[in-house]
Amino acid sequence: MNGSRKSGGGFAAALARAFALAMLLICAPPLLSAAESTSPDIASAYVTVRDGVYLLNVQTVYPLTEDISRALDDGVTLNFDLQAQVLKQRRFWYDATLVDVIVRRELSWHAVSERFVLKDISAGGSQQLFMTLEEALEAVGSVQDWPVIVEPQLDPDSAYQISVRAEMRRGRMPDALRMLVFWSDAWSRASDWREWALPR
């Protein structure tokens, strides 16, 4: 992704490349599921409390694979979600979901500026530019001081659990690819849920 890029050699070459990527996207789910390294991994997650606001900090490691690099190079947008839930624990019944929120981000390649564009959908569409895919993926996985719940929502006599999960999936595609893969499901990869007691 970081080397020189050559323009397509005509419609036939572009269509052939689109077909190759379409086959990759169609075959990706069974192939990728066999390798843990292709799924996101939550490296660290913790909560701090400031002025009665519970702030979530998470660092997710997203794999830098040839599949991801090629997809971005060919105009596919990748979506990244970090989901957080706060559950009220109940002894004789299912836990009650108190909060279920998502940070949603979108990564694409801008061929004219030769930069990776990271758009934070949850923050009004603010954008950051990166020269390398490594830098972009590191930024995608970094969530800091995300307010997920406030103290008045919590019962002082109850116990609560917080859970987080990261997911990556295919987003928008160029028209040529969309025509070729209309019959296939969008591939996605998710981390395991990471759970711990909410600090009080």
Image (cartoon, grey):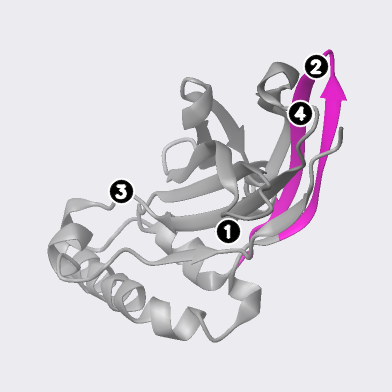
| Marks 1, 2: nearer the viewer | 2
Would residue 48 be counted in the magenta stretch? yes
Q: Amino acid at mark 3?
A: Arg
Residue beneath label 2, please? 52
Q: Secondary structure at mark 4?
A: strand
Q: Secondary structure at mark 2?
A: loop
Residue beneath label 4, please? 55
Instruction: Report x, y in % for residue 159.
Output: 77, 41
Q: Secondary structure at mark 1?
A: loop
Instruction: Report x, y in % for residue 105.
Output: 51, 39
| Dominant secondary structure of the residues highlighted in magenta in the image | strand
Reading the chain from its start, which is encountered first: label 1 or label 2?
1
Q: Is residue 94 above or below residue 190?
A: above
Between residues 100 and 69, which one lies in front from this camera angle?
Answer: 100
Residue beneath label 1, please? 3
Please indicate whether residue 66 sits to the left or right of residue 170 in the image. Answer: right
Reading the chain from its start, which is encountered first: label 3 or label 4?
4
| Marks 4, 2: nearer the viewer | 2
Q: Is residue 115 above or below residue 3?
A: above
| Marks 4, 1: nearer the viewer | 4
Q: Amino acid at mark 4?
A: Leu
- Which range is magenta? 42-64
CB within 8 Å, label 3 to label 4: no
| Marks 3, 4: nearer the viewer | 4
Residue beneath label 3, please? 172
Residue visible at 40% across and 77% down in the picture: 29
